[in-house]
Image: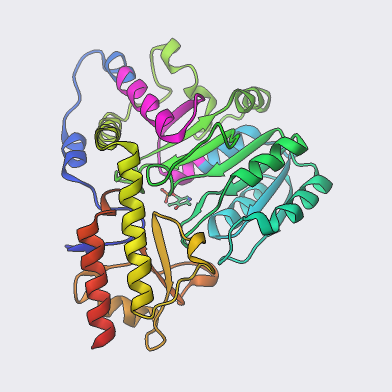
Amino acid sequence: MYAPIPMVPGPVTIPQYVLDALSADYPSGQIDADFLPLYAACERGLQKLMGTKNRVLIMSGEGMLALWGALKSVVTEHDRVFVVANGVFSQGMFAMAKSLGCQTEIFSLDFASVVDAAVLSQIFDKAAAFQPTLLCACHCETPSGTLNPLEGLAKIKKDLGIPLFYVDMVSSIGGTPIAVDAWQVDLALGGSQKCLSLPPSLCFASVSPAAFARMEEVNYQGYDALLPFRSIYQDGRCPYTPNWHGMAALNASLTAIFQEGLDNVFQRHLSCQQFVLKSLATLGLALWPRDPSFASPTVTCAKLPSAYTWPAWQEALRKRGLIVAGSFGPMAGKVFRLGHMGEQAQMHLVQAALDVLEIVLRQ
Ligand SMILES: *Cc1c(COP(=O)(O)O)cnc(C)c1O
């Protein structure tokens, strides 16, 4: 269906330069020899985007593949996994670790909160009692539109000597400043279909030396294992078929981001978010996050107007060309979401979206 105002927080609309890169055929002949420099360029770009000197391994598959692969690569049933959960994806990590037979502990917050200073001492105490081998969190909880500060968790990791810190950054990388090394993140996981404006075809993981060391001990064997990607440059080949089209598209996306300038890209996301927050308040629509300062610059989650059910709201907006998302878990049927990330972080787009919201609310 043609969507004049695409505002779903992933998969986002794909810009023409990415579509062009996707549709270009790959060179014949030395396939891997040509592919690896492209892979290396993307790895360097992602390192810059993520604020890390660690390797960034790029794999075919969507974001969940990186989340599963990274987790399975560093845990056994003897590991103690501590999850700080304030949303659908962090709750999901807890379920994932449980399903792998790990010993698990969770610090749960309601989904309108973030991991702010108010809860850090409680998290510290619970983690100190549990003695985790792996600390897990989600940076941007897309389903509830919140962005978790990570400095406090980084300090807890350091103070308690927790060996590894695993963070889902699928919907924040490329839309807001990321400091993987400063935040001491050992495994930072990303995907292609959010702020990078690609189809859901690639995912990536930054891997610290400590995480690599743990991977060697665990020696997980599986399609989603990360370790086989570590030696691609020495091996002169990828473990599996080179994803030419996806990598060319990722390179196009990263090139565009650095041409625009990282600060400008982040400012564009912030400006769109600030406009959305201000306009929603003017329209009398309440945010889902308890405090506007909890809201992510990449996605806004707002409560449904009281006169509408989710299906009726979605239908009314669609009739005027605006495609928004609902949500999951405790937010299902109560909220709608606008994804102003990547190619969708455009002022003309969010203005058009807010115009539709205003018209529908006034009719
Ligand atoms: C979208 C998303 C994922 C999953 O990515 P897929 O590409 O859908 O597999 C994981 N975590 C967060 C926070 C996301 O927004």
Magenta stretch encompasses residue 50: yes
Identify which residue is drawn at 42% across, 71% down.
Answer: 302
Residue at the outermost right position: 129
Residue 154, image x, y percentages? 64, 40
Query: Mostly what secondary structure, the magenta segment?
Result: helix
Residue 264 sits in which quadrant? top left
On screen, 216 above or below 74? above
Q: How many marks?
A: 0
Identify which residue is drawn at 43% across, 17% down.
Answer: 232
On screen, 58 above or below 320? above
Magenta stretch encompasses residue 54: yes
Residue 200, image x, y percentages? 34, 46
Quadrant the C terminus occupies? bottom left
On screen, 44 above or below 133? above
Q: Which residues are magenta?
A: 37-66
The type of colouring in the image is: rainbow
Residue 338 in view of the camera: yes
Residue 78 in view of the camera: no
Quadrant the N terminus occupies? bottom left
Identify which residue is drawn at 23% across, 48% down.
Answer: 14
Residue 249, image x, y percentages? 26, 35
Residue 217, image x, y percentages? 68, 24
Identify which residue is drawn at 38% across, 81% down.
Answer: 284
Q: Is residue 315 left or right of residue 218?
A: left
Q: Is residue 68 left or right of residue 318?
A: right
Q: Is residue 113 left or right of residue 361?
A: right
On screen, 190 above or below 181? below
